[in-house]
Image: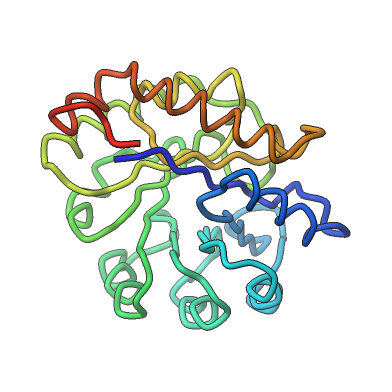
């Protein structure tokens, strides 16, 4: 397991987005996190497949698409065609979650399942072996710039122990309130995929800040119990 950084462009400067994405590339971003909101499942409204398709023309970074929408099954093919590499759906929006996970995999994409802060982990019981990623929302979804919910450290740790016991190659992604203060603790708790949004885009030097986040996260991983125990040896960076 290794640290992955997925900057969220939700709070980026869209009038200067191409230049900011180039800075993220230089800083070593592993992917771009694209928050798709429909104004119904969450109160905010963002963008759809045409914007994703236009972004695909300016970067080769993988697109980590987070569908915060009602009826996400209606959008899978459109976002895959627009250039998505991974699609994450919310368990709360999916009465047939296993079916959607299989549909994402059939499209040749990585499949993720997101859980809101109050959603218990047991909803993953019969899909955990099928997915590539669990996204734990560490704020209530809908807006950038919220404060991290401290109860989520315990939830991250509980999920990490479950994944490690089962020896599953599943990433734990955290989204919401990730900054220089919370980063070390979320990695220590068991997260390895970090969505960083408003805190990153407040930095004057995007490239330097992203590199600093990686150094901090990798140092935290080396110090953490789960990284050593989960791999049986020194964690892979």
Q: Could you tell me which residue is drawn at 65 percent across and 64 percent down?
A: 38
Q: Is residue 189 left or right of residue 226?
A: right
Please tell me whether residue 142 is drawn above or below residue 83 in the rendered image.
Answer: above
Residue 192 x %, y %? 39, 37
User: Seen in the image, is 81 located left or right of residue 26?
Assistant: left
Viewer-proximal residue among 170 and 234: 234
Residue 236 position within the rendered picture, expressed as x and y whole percent measured from the top left: 29, 36
Give the vertical position of 85 relative to 92 (above or below): below
Residue 223 is drawn in which quadrant?
top left
Q: Residue 213 location, x and y as percent? A: 57, 30
Front-lying residue, 147 or 24: 24
From the image, which quarter does the N terminus lie in? top left
Looking at the image, is 106 positioned above or below residue 209? below
Residue drawn at (46%, 76%) of the image? 76
Task: Tell me if 65 is positioned left or right of 136 in this view.
Answer: right
Q: Determine the residue positioned at 37% across, 21% down.
A: 188
Name the spot of residue 172 as percent of width and height, x first: 36, 41
* Quadrant in which the C terminus appears: top left
Render colour scheme: rainbow
Furthest residue to the right?
A: 15
Q: Residue at x 19, y 31 (%)?
A: 230
Q: Quadrant of residue 22?
A: bottom right
Instruction: Tell me: 202 left or right of 192.
Output: right
Q: How many marks?
A: 0
């Amino acid at each position: 397991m290794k640290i992955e950084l997925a900057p969220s462009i939700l709070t980026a400067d869209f009038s200067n987005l191409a230049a900011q994405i180039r800075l993220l590339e230089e800083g070593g971003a592993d992917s771009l996190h694209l928050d798709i909101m429909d104004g119904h499942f969450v109160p905010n409204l963002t963008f759809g497949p045409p914007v994703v398709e236009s972004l695909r023309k300016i970067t080769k970074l993988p697109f980590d698409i987070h569908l915060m929408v009602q009826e996400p099954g209606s959008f899978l093919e459109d976002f895959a065609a627009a250039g998505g590499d991974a699609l994450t759906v919310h368990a709360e929006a999916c009465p047939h979650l296993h079916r959607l996970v299989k549909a994402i995999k059939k499209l040749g994409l990585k499949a993720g399942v997101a859980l809101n802060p109050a959603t218990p982990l047991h909803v993953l019981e019969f899909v955990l072996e099928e997915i590539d990623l669990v996204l734990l929302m560490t704020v209530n979804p809908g807006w950038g710039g919220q404060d991290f919910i401290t109860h989520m450290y315990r939830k991250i740790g509980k999920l990490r122990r479950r994944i490690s016991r089962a020896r599953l190659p599943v990433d734990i992604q955290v989204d919401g309130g990730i900054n220089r203060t919370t980063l070390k603790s979320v990695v220590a708790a068991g997260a390895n995929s970090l969505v960083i949004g408003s805190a990153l885009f407040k930095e004057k030097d995007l490239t330097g800040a992203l590199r600093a986040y990686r150094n901090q996260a990798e140092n935290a991983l080396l110090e953490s119990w789960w990284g050593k125990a989960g791999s049986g040896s020194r964690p892979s960076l």
